[in-house]
Every structure is written in C-alpha cells, then in structure tokens.
Image: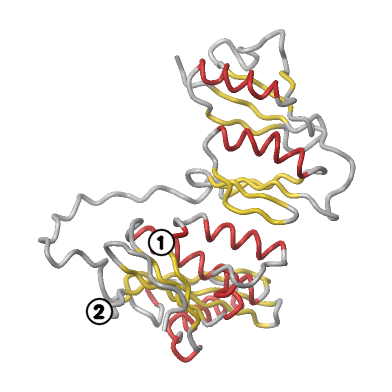
Amino acid sequence: MPQQSTPSAGRLLYVEADGGSRGNPGVAGYGALVRDPDTGAVLDIDAQPLGRASNNVAEYSGMIAGLRMARQIDPDAAVHVRLDSKLVVEQMSGRWKIKHADMQKLAAEARAILPAGQVTYEWIPRAKNKDADLLSNEAMDAGASGTAWVKETSGIKVTGAAPTSASAPAPTPPPAVVPPRRRGRLHHVEIWVEDLEVARSSLGWLFQELGYDVSGEWSEGTSYQGAGEYLVLESGPHVRASGHDRLSPGLNHVAFHAGSRAEVDALTEAARSRGFALLFADRHPFAGGRNHYAAYLEAPNGFEVELVAEPA
C-alpha cells in the first residue's frame, strides 16, 4: 500500500525508478519509466550511465529522470513514485533527514520538478521493480562498455500513449513539433562562497527578485530554481578562504534578463541599498555599448552580476 495518500488531480501516473553502482562507488547508471496505473502500459522510458558514482546518487538520478518524464507527459498529473530504495523514499517523504550534501542537492533538484502536493512516494520490494532494474542495468552495461544507452533496443518497450479522459473524445493530434534543444544549454550554475549568509542575503535575494524560487536549503547551501536551469550558492570547509576576485582568470560575471529599463533601474537601486556596488558608474547604463542598457553590479562577496534590459 502507498505510504502517503495520493494527491487529488485529474490523472495519476506511476514513476518507477532504480539506480545501481558496480563498486559503490563504481560504474553507475539509472533507469526510469512512467506507467499508466490503470492499464499497466509503459508511457516512456529512460536510462543513462553516470560514469563513476555511488548507488545513492544513481537512485536519486533515476527518480529525477522519472519525474521529468512524468512532467513532460502531463505537468498537472498526480505522480506516485515507486522505488525499492527505502533511503530515498523516506528522505523524499520528509521522514528521514538528508545529511550528505550531494544528496541534499539531488533532493532539491527532484523537489523542484513538480509541486510538492502532486508527488507521493512508496517503497516497493525489488521484485516489483524489475523493469526499472533492467533499465538501470542496461545503463551500467553501456557505461562499462563506453557506449550510449539506446532506447530503441531496450528490453523495456513503450507500450502505450499518455491516457486521456474517458468521457471526452480523443483530441486531434497537433502538428509534429520539434522538441526544444537541450544539449548545450545551461543545466545549473554553482557558486561557491566564503560566507553563505552574506551570499543568501545578497545574491540569493537578487535571484528571487529575478523570478527564481528557493528549491532547497541545507546547512552548506541553497538552490534556486528558474524556468529551466537552477542556481546554487554553496559554502563549507572545502571552500578556500581567499574571497572571490572577478578580475582573476575564470568566470567574470553572470548576466540576467531583468525586464524593462525601468525594471532594471528599480532593481539596481534596490540592490545598491543591500550592499551591491554599481560598477562602471561613469558609463552606466551603457557600459556595455550604446545599444546595450544594463547595470553591472558587484555583490558584497565580490561576485559580479549584470542586469540586462529588454531592447527598447
């Protein structure tokens, strides 16, 4: 039986996921699928090798892949995640604490995919998770041989389409649409900071003003989810106490779309009141060129951000 009540929604989807590591850490991979609980049909599958990783990382990665597939099928569906990892189920259900920083980040990434009220979790025995287990082993086999996992040759086949309401006629299929290109786009940006509280109150504040939502918090960091990518502020004993120097080799700054010119001006003033310094003040707001309206700001920790206005 499910360990939590299923949230109310017009449709229910099952996510089944598994991950493994041969060596722990060792050659790792995950497998995930989305199933129609009424018909048992498999609606989509995914599996990927992860290089060298731990078993827990692989388990979390499989769950994340399954949640993303479910969102792609129906972003409004109730999603019931079925895993044979007791650890992941208890941590994602909030009953067990997540102590490891890597697991905290993965949990935050998973929680950002769908609203919390749409997702529930259930532990199932490994014998009832055979399809996801097969997919994860295919991924590990691919990783061990240095090849890619191929969906079309998988032992688990997609056997059905996403369910539609029984009371309504099937909609006319839309014209074929090429899915948006993901390869090469930013997945996330992780910023290491010496003082996390200062960064949360400055950069973290700015991220939220720009439309990012806090998607996870742990003792050494915070993640902020955007429309696609997410941002991370992280500190801890592994961060060198040398401060950030934007003029040293490496990343100089990150630029954000910030709305109209008036919105850029207002956000710039608000940021300056929170300790940000306006850079290139003698050329502001056209320091980037006469047709480029933007504010260049240095956060209290030395990190530079650019707020770019939409073309007039």
Residue 5, image quadrant: bottom left
Q: How many numbered discs?
A: 2
- 240, above or below 286, in the image: below
Label 2 crowding class (10 Å Cα cut-off): few <14, some 14-19, many 20+?
few
Q: Which quadrant of the figure has residue 11?
A: bottom left
x, y (%) of residue 72? Answer: 37, 58
Give the quarter of the figure containing the N terminus.
Answer: bottom left
Rendered location of residue 297, percent (x, y): 69, 24
Left or right: 179 in relation to 129: left
In depth, the one of 27 and 286 nearer the eye is: 286
- Please name the residue shown 85% across and 55% down the image: 237
Residue that appears at 67% across and 22% down: 296
Left or right of residue 219, residue 131 in this image: left
Mark 1–mark 2 distance (CA, rounded to whole Å) = 21 Å
Q: Which residue is mark 1?
A: 118
Residue type, label 2: Thr
Q: Residue at x 76, y 42 (%)?
A: 197
- Look at mark 2 in the image and give the residue it sits on: 39
